[in-house]
């Protein structure tokens, strides 16, 4: 019997979506495989992938985008060297590695390949692909932005762009008006500053000001839980500003992390990022 796909949990009557971090349904999955990404989208899951810019093709205009987290190819793929120096033809000859660094038969995906996969997949109700951009606005010249828009526009209604750089979020989403908008204000030492100085209200105000079109705000779980311990409801603060909240990342799923997930659900998290949504559902079930 096929197990239902793990797309959401219920905590005290509150439904919280489970986001498949790096396209993983289980912790044993290799990240970013086309097979799992398609599985998640068919099931109606929220699926996150990471994007890096790669080198322009000969005669091309602007950089392209590849589905990878690291800035080097060595750890996650069968290639070597900086991602930013690899062309699309070089990347298409590579395969992903599994969690034990063994080569798989799964190819490295370019953004155009990912968009084609989405087009060819019957998306389940609520399916959403998060494009988490790992570079910043400094790499986004006009040709690169145009390449992004060409790839993403056909699937924009089922995708959301996120980044820790508000300028990059603005540039890329302005180029694709139908694309959903997300923003992560927890980078560049922000968590430690907020917790040290307890500037919670300023943190919320600054996030809204920097990315006013953001529908989803991505918050590190350490910030959310420490603030809650101090009597501050950050999720509620963003809800009052009409933003949904994703809390990240629950990696190893065990009894302790399930307790954290229950607490985040009780705090009203709209979505929780995890490397093992299947295990979350099994333990909560």
Image: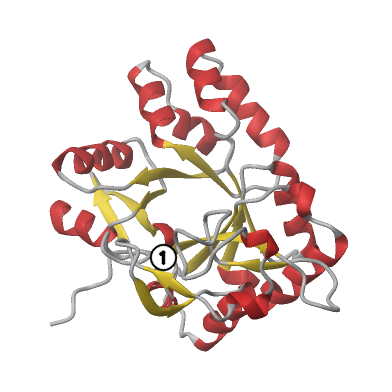
Tell me what residue is drawn at x 75 percent, y 64 percent.
Answer: 177
The image shows residue 124, relative to residue 98, as above or below, that is below
Q: Colour scheme of this structure image? A: secondary structure
Is residue 285 shown left or right of residue 20?
Answer: left
Q: Name the quadrant of the N terminus.
A: bottom left
Residue 249 image position (x, y, % from top left):
38, 45
Is residue 137 shown left or right of residue 3?
Answer: right
Between 184 and 140, the one nearer to me in the picture:
140
Task: Say if residue 39 shows up in the picture.
Answer: no
Residue 68 image position (x, y, % from top left):
53, 62
The image shows residue 48, relative to residue 202, as above or below, that is below
Give the residue furthest to the bottom. 120
Is residue 153 shown left or right of residue 225?
Answer: right
- Residue tagged by mark 1? 23
Tell me what residue is drawn at x 48 percent, y 85 percent.
Answer: 121
User: Badge 1: how crowded within 10 Å, few (<14), some, or many (20+)?
Assistant: many
């Amino acid at each position: 019997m096929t197990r239902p796909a793990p797309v959401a949990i219920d905590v005290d009557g509150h439904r919280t979506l489970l986001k498949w971090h790096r396209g993983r349904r289980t912790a044993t999955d290799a990240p970013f495989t086309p097979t799992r990404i398609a599985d998640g989208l068919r099931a109606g899951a929220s699926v996150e992938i990471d994007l890096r810019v790669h080198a322009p093709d000969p005669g091309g205009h602007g950089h392209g985008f590849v589905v990878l987290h690291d800035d080097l190819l060595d750890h996650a793929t069968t290639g070597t060297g900086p991602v930013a120096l690899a062309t699309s033809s070089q990347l298409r000859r590579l395969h992903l590695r599994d969690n034990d660094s063994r080569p798989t038969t799964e190819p490295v995906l370019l953004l155009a390949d990912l968009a084609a996969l989405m087009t060819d997949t019957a998306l389940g109700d609520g399916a959403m692909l998060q494009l988490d951009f790992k570079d910043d606005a400094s790499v986004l010249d006009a040709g690169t932005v145009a390449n992004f828009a060409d790839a993403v526009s056909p699937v924009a209604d089922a995708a959301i762009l996120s980044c820790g750089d508000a300028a990059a979020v603005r540039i890329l989403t302005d180029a694709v008006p139908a694309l959903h908008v997300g923003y992560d204000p927890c980078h560049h030492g922000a968590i430690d500053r907020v917790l040290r100085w307890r500037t919670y209200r300023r943190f919320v105000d600054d996030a809204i000001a920097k990315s006013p079109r953001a529908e989803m705000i991505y918050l590190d779980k350490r910030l959310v839980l420490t603030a809650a311990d101090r009597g501050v409801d950050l999720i509620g603060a963003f809800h009052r500003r009409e933003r949904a909240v994703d809390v990240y990342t629950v990696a190893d799923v065990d009894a302790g992390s399930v307790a954290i997930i229950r607490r985040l659900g009780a705090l009203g998290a709209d979505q929780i990022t995890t490397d093992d949504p299947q295990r979350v559902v099994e333990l909560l079930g």
